Structure formats: C-alpha cells, structure tokens
C-alpha cells in the first residue's frame, strides 16, 4: 500500500509504490527543500503511467537522472551600498538539464531565494522548455538580494558583482539566463553590460534585452499573453471564449499586467490584483485607463497596489493578514483565475473557494502557484486547469524567439512575434490534450503537460547515453 502526501487542508494524494520509493530517496538526498519535493512529486505521479508502459526509461533511471542537476553553482556576491558599506549576498545558478539544448531559465532576485526554490524552478523549466518545441534545456538562478528599496546605483553595483562570477559559467550556446522576479529590463541591462565587458563580445547571452541592443518585441508581454492564450484554447474545447468572463488575477508585476491587457483585448473583465501588502477588488473592472495607472505605479514609481484604491472610487484594498489559512483574493465570484504572483499562492481552501464561487478555468501565469491539495481538487472537479509549465511557457518561448533573432542578426515585427507566440501556445495546448488522452487521462492537463515535456527530454537522454 502507498502512503499519502498532505500539504494543506484535507489534501491527500495516494502514491504508487514506485513513486513512494522514488520520493523517499529524493527527500533523503535533498532534505529541507519542500518546493523541490512538491515539483518532482507532481511530475513523478504523472509519468509513472509512462514508465509502466515503457520500462526502458525506468531501467535507464531517466527520472532519477532528471532530478539531479547537471551542475549546481553557488557563489558569494560582495558589493558596496550607497553608504560605502560592504554587503554580501549568495548567488546561484542551477544548470538542470541540457539534453535538448543550452540551459535556459530566469534569474530571480528576492530574499526568499534559496537552493531548494531554485531547484524546483529549474526542474519545472526543463519540462516547460521542452513543451515549447524550441531547442532549450532547463536552468534557473538568482540571489537572496532584495532589490526593493535599493537605489539604481546599488542595483547596478550588485548586478555587476553578480555577473563578475556568473559570466564564466554561461554563454549563448551553453546557458542563456533571462529575467524573473526582481529582474526586469534595468537589471538585464546591467548584467549584460558587465558580461560584454568581461568577455569582450556581443552575443545573445541574456534574453529580455532592450530593443535597441538585441531584445525582442513582445518579450515583456509574453508570459501574461501566453497564459491568456492558453486559457482561450482550453475554453475553446467547450465552445466558449473569454468574452464576458469575470477574471481574478493575482500579482501586479510584469506577468499580471500583461495578463490583464490580453484579457481586456479578448473581452474579459478583471476585478483583482495584488502585491505583498494586500490586494485590490474592483467590481467595476480594471479597464485600460486603470491598467495604465497600475503600470506607471509599479514600473515607474515602484509604489504599492493600495494606491489603486485611493485613486479609483469603488475599489477596495484588503491588507495581507499574517496567520490566515486562505487568501481572500480567491474568494470572489468569477469565471476564471490567473494566479500570476508566486509559488503556492492557492492552497486547498483557496481552491475550494474558487470552485464555490463559480471559477471553472484556472490558467497559471506563475510557477507552481497551486499546492498539491489545490491541484487535486481542480482535477477531481474536472475544471479547465492549465498548470504553469504549460500555461506560462509563453515567456520562455519568446525568449527562445529572441535567441533565434540574435543568432540570425534579425529583428521581427511585433505582429510576427505575437503570431509565433500564439502558435506556440496552441501547440502546447494540443500536446497536453493529445498526451493526456494517449495515456488514459483525457482532459487532465497536468498529466498531458508533464508527459509531453518528459518524453522529448527522456528520448534525447536515451539517444545520448549515460552522460
């Protein structure tokens, strides 16, 4: 008999004997890394179906090799703040898997960054990149540096110090980082400048670059746009569209902003956004004018979302309260939810509230925003649930398109890039549908995404031998 994994209120998922043994070994080798355990468990449960049908993968210990990073790089980052005081942070780069292409994945700057979180993100990235159909392996990196409250000069000095070590481990055909939480166009610029100086070469080593020096149109919008395109594809399986649908969106950064923009373009209505201090609920809906205010607030003035409620009458701000076992943002009447903030922001109680309030579409703009218990509820009720590795793959897909433009010394138009992005999201959706049906779980996008991503990487690893 298998045991159960419990991650929050009433969350119980039975493990197969193989997965139970595999997870026990993984946890023993990687203690105190709960996010990594969670990410691996979800994939292992899905692909156990594949391993039963294709024992050659199990014999080659493909899954056991996939969870072990090919290279883990940890380094110190000393820098000097505006007061002339020396500060020290820790830098990371997890080069997880390069079976189908150079490592590709973002850099995250946030106090919560640690080895376990980056391993979970790098592991997810392997499958996400595989699903895009582009030749990209998976990696992730970053630092526990907190950019919040730092001056431009402090951020520049940190980025230069960070790259002065990272540069020796990356390259356009080896490892191509991008942005993530805390790393936008400003930070990419500082990082690229130091790389170019140290290597004395101008190459496509980073994505998310400025348009004047090798960046791609639509890259800032891509993750948010992609999650909405994926939701639209899921709705199309029920002969519905986003027109007239009420949507809950969390976060207020890059992903959330462009999720709202694309929802508005497709006729939907967004009523929530959030940051670490709390969330706003606007029953009238966030229109283009209000979205422009949010973009200025967050991207230029770097203010807090509470200011939205001060600016627009009828909007209500609810501050974050410590110790709550649910997030009230997910407790409003709606049709669709787009979690676009961070990992594990929807637990089992939140999932139950979403279902109770009529939500039947969840498209994940952030990485692993739903706990195991929440995922189990969504699958049990048969709603349209798009997991992050499929639904938010638009960002890295457009990073891949930026790499292609850099390699060819070309710059595609906005329409060309958006068309390619839309096509990639359609293909990812089709893969999820096909794979879930082929392995006996039709409509289960979690299985479809995990299996579709796994097979391409697994076959490449089989072809290349034990390396």
Image (cartoon, helix red, strand yellow):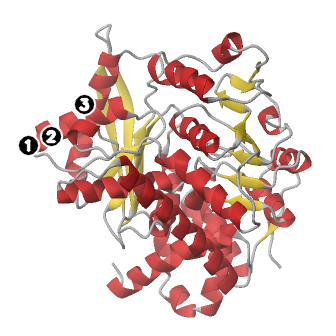
Residue in front for this viewpoint, 233 or 80: 233
Instruction: Give the image quarter of residue 324.
Output: top right
Tell me residue 94's x, y (percent): 40, 54
The numbered dot on residue 160 is 3
Which residue is farthest top? 83
User: Residue 460, can we see it?
Assistant: yes
The answer to whether residue 176 is above or below residue 304 is: below
Instruction: Give the image quarter of residue 443.
Output: bottom right
Q: Mark 1 points at which residue?
A: 200
Mark 2–mark 1 CB contact (< 8 Å): yes
Which residue is farthest left? 200
Give the residue displayed 27% in from the left and 33% down from the top. Answer: 189
As drawn, is 281 to the left or to the right of 258?
right
Q: Name the residue under label 2.
A: 196
For marks 3 and 2, give the one nearer the viewer: 2
Q: How many marks?
A: 3
* Label 1: few (<14), some (14–19) or many (≥20) C-alpha neighbours in 10 Å: few
Residue in front for this viewpoint, 334 or 11: 334
The answer to whether residue 332 is above or below residue 428 is: above
Q: In which quarter of the image is the N terminus?
A: bottom right
Distance Cα–Cα, label 2 vs label 1: 5 Å
């Amino acid at each position: 008999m298998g045991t159960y994994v419990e991650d929050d209120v009433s969350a119980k998922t039975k493990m197969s004997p193989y997965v139970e043994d595999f997870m026990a070994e993984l946890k023993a080798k990687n203690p105190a890394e709960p996010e990594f355990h969670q990410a691996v468990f979800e994939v292992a449960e899905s692909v156990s179906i594949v391993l039963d049908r294709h024992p050659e993968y199990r014999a080659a210990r493909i899954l056991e090799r996939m969870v072990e990073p090919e290279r883990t790089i940890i380094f110190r980052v000393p820098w000097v703040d505006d007061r002339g005081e020396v500060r020290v942070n820790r830098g990371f780069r997890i080069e997880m898997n390069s079976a189908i292409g150079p490592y590709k994945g973002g850099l995250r700057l946030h106090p919560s960054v640690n080895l376990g979180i980056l391993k979970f993100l790098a592991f997810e990235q392997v499958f996400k990149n595989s699903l895009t159909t582009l030749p990209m392996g998976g990696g992730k990196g970053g630092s526990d540096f907190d950019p919040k409250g730092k001056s431009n000069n402090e951020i520049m000095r940190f980025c230069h110090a960070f790259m002065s070590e990272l540069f020796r481990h990356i390259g356009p055909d080896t490892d191509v980082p991008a942005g993530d939480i805390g790393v936008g166009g400003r930070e990419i610029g500082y990082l690229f400048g130091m790389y170019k100086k140290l290597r004395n070469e101008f190459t496509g080593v980073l994505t998310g670059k400025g348009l004047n020096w090798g960046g791609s149109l639509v890259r800032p919008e891509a993750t948010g746009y992609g999650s909405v395109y994926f939701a639209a594809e899921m709705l199309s399986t029920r002969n519905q569209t986003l027109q007239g649908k009420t949507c809950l969106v969390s976060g207020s950064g890059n992903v959330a902003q462009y999720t709202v923009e694309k929802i508005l373009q497709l006729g939907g209505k967004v009523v929530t956004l959030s940051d670490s201090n709390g969330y706003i609920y606007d029953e009238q809906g966030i229109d283009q004018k209000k979205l422009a205010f949010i973009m200025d607030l967050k991207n230029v003035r770097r203010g807090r979302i509470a200011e939205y409620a001060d600016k627009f009458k009828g909007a209500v701000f609810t501050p974050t309260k410590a110790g709550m076992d649910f997030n009230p943002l997910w407790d409003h009447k709606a049709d669709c939810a787009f979690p676009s903030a961070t990992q594990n922001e929807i637990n089992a109680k939140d999932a139950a509230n979403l279902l109770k309030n009529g939500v039947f579409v969840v498209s994940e703009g952030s990485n692993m925003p739903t706990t195991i218990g929440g995922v189990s509820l969504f699958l049990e009720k048969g709603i349209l649930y798009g997991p992050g590795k499929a639904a938010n793959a638009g960002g890295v897909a457009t990073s891949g398109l930026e790499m292609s433009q850099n390699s060819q010394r070309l710059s595609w138009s906005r329409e060309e890039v958006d068309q390619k992005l839309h096509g990639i999201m359609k293909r990812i959706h089709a893969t999820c549908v096909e794979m879930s049906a082929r392995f006996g779980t039709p409509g289960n996008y979690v299985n479809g995404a995990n299996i579709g991503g796994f097979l391409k990487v697994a076959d490449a690893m089989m072809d290349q031998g034990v390396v």
